[in-house]
Image (cartoon, rainbow, N blue to C red):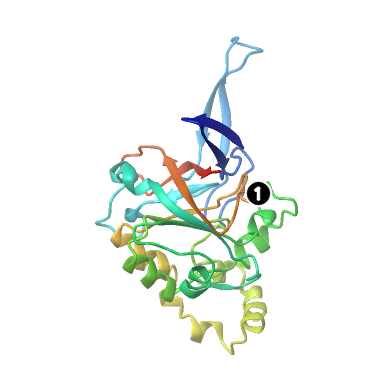
Amino acid sequence: MEEREENDMSEKLYDLTQKWGSGIWQWPAFDDTVVTSTHRHGKQGLRSLNIYTNMHTGTHIDAPVHFDPRGKDIASVPLDRLYGEGVIVDVSELGEFGIVTPDLITSKVQVKKHDIVVYYTGWHKYSWEGDTPDEVTYFGKLPGCHKEWAKFAVEMDLKWVGFDTPCYELALNTYMREFHPDLIPLAEKKMGIDSYDEKYPRDEYNIVQKMTLPYDSLHVECIGGEIDIVPKNIRCRIGCFPWKFVRGDASISRVVAFVGE
């Protein structure tokens, strides 16, 4: 956390970004990140690295083209869509397989049109840099959003929605259902439903992203860093700063909350 003083006003900056590097966890469908060196101090007296990675790793933003073939790439997303006023909301009461709804968010803080919304579930503790890392829980049991939230995000023209989980969707409304079918009965019991497949059909995988990205309502996954200590249920300024990646479907990013005192 950094503090800046300007015009007799103080502002604290909170870094909401996961540490990134070789060994960072991946979605099951992706290859591991590989970092190698071209130059090393012991040989050439300088250091330069090569990286092989997908862009959906660590704290990252998804571009509309990720699910919309006619959508913008990362390089085409305007800066005013990446930075602005918004809210940080604590929904950590949800727990495993919970559902984030508009009413839950707006019962805690006012959400305005064109806001940025960051919600905190406490899931960062299960990430690769968390206090209790658990890869299956992190990817497979997370609380997430569904159609009701997607409609709200589009109606409110939210610039982007960020969260300390690895996915915008409900835990198993992705191909995680194929990788871990053992989690389905756990989810059904926790959610009080008879059949996950009937309640959430497989042909609606990633439905929140498919409903929001065509409207340039973006999302930032795997928020972390100082997310545990940033003030919650407040309004502040928030920014996501990705690479200017031509044809990029996503980009590794730095996310910062600018909280006034």
Q: Residue furthest right?
A: 132
Q: Is residue 86 positioned above or below 10 on the image?
A: below
Picture coordinates of residue 53, whole percent (x, y): 50, 41
Asked whether, in this view, residue 40 is left or right of residue 219, the answer is: right
Picture coordinates of residue 259, whole percent (x, y): 53, 44
Work out whether residue 234 or residue 152 is closer to the camera in this orientation and state it: 234
Q: Is residue 41 positioned above or below 213 on the image?
A: above
Picture coordinates of residue 89, whole percent (x, y): 55, 60
Q: In which quarter of the image is the N terminus?
A: top right
Amino acid type shown at disc 1: Ile
Q: Is residue 42 positioned above or below 7 on the image?
A: above
Which residue is drawn at the image coordinates 54% and 48% (left, top)? 31
Classify mark 1: residues with Cα within 10 Å, few (<14), some (14-19) or many (20+).
Answer: few
Asked whether, in this view, residue 173 is left or right of residue 132, the answer is: left
Displayed quadrant of residue 181: bottom right
Work out whether residue 69 or residue 85 is closer to the camera in this orientation and state it: 85
Q: In which quarter of the image is the C terminus?
A: top right
Work out whether residue 69 or residue 77 is closer to the camera in this orientation and state it: 77
Q: Name the residue under label 1.
A: 229
SS under mark 1: loop
Which residue is drawn at the image coordinates 68% and 46% (left, top)? 129
Asked whether, in this view, residue 54 is left or right of residue 23, the answer is: left
